[in-house]
Image: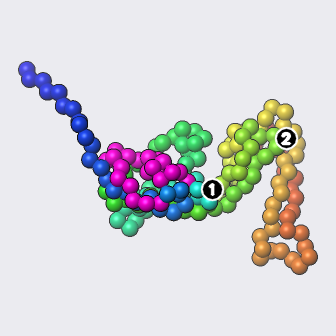
């Protein structure tokens, strides 16, 4: 019987381009086992103008993966964090729709909402409602889109939405 011990002394590196709304957009030499999160980290992270919901990996001119950082940040899920290949482009686009979750939520913050997400998704991202929350009334302050505004009319509208524990 013959046994072999193999030791990797050095990993190959790939040149990856990190562009868009990152702190230091540039070309980076990353380990051949580096992932999208490693590339974003190497570039100093995302700027405050970046979308955390749709980091794109482009390979040969096509988008091969889109990473939602909320999956990682809020749930620890790295299922979509793929390994990068030579010449890949990691692109951080500008943010989309943002909503401020404040008041009686566990994690008050500004959240980026996906195209089909609802109030329920916002509450879930914010960690749910605190135990002392009054669920009979959720106050929503909505900015009226410019094309729907009237002269001398309000720029914001107020909506009261009843919420009960089954909606969380």
Name the mark nearer the viewer: 2 or 1: 1
Q: Which colour scheme appears in the figure?
A: rainbow
Residue 97 position in % (x across, y down): 67, 60
- Kind of element beneath mark 2: loop
**100 within the magenta span:** no
Numbered disc 1: secondary structure: loop
Where residue 1 sits, quadrant-wise, is: top left
Is residue 105 shown above or below 18?
Answer: above
Residue closest to the far left: 1
The residue sitting at the right extreme is 152
In the foreground, 11 or 156: 11
Residue at (79, 35) in percent of width and height: 130
Observer able to see residue 47: yes
The numbered mark at residue 135 is 2
Residue 40 in magenta?
A: yes
Q: Position of residue 6 (x, y in %)?
A: 18, 31
Rendered view: 132 above or below 112? above
Q: Which residues are magenta?
A: 25-46
Left/right placement of residue 112 relative to residue 82 reads right
The CA span between labels 2 and 1 is 31 Å
At horizontal 49% and vertical 57% (from top left) the residue drawn is 24
Q: Nearer the viewer, residue 54 or 109?
A: 109
Q: Where is residue 86, by image quadrant?
A: bottom left
Instruction: Identify the residue shown where x is 87% and y is 58%.
Output: 158
Q: Position of residue 108 (x, y in %)?
A: 74, 43
Q: Which mark is residue 48?
A: 1
């Amino acid at each position: 019987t013959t046994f072999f011990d193999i030791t990797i002394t050095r990993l190959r590196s790939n040149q990856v381009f990190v562009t868009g709304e990152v702190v230091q957009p540039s070309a980076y030499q990353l380990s051949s086992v580096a992932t999208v999160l490693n590339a974003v980290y190497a570039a100093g992270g995302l700027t405050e103008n970046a979308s955390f919901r749709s980091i794109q990996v482009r390979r040969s001119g096509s988008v091969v993966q889109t990473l939602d950082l909320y999956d990682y940040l809020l749930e620890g899920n790295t299922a979509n964090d793929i390994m990068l290949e030579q010449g890949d482009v990691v692109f951080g686009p500008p943010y989309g729709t943002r909503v401020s979750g404040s008041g009686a939520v566990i994690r008050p913050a500004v959240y980026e909402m996906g195209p089909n997400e609802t109030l329920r998704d916002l509450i879930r991202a914010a960690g749910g409602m605190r135990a002392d929350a009054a669920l009979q009334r959720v106050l929503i302050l909505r900015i009226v889109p410019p094309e729907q505004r009237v002269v001398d009319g309000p720029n914001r509208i107020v909506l009261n939405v009843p919420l009960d524990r089954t909606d969380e």
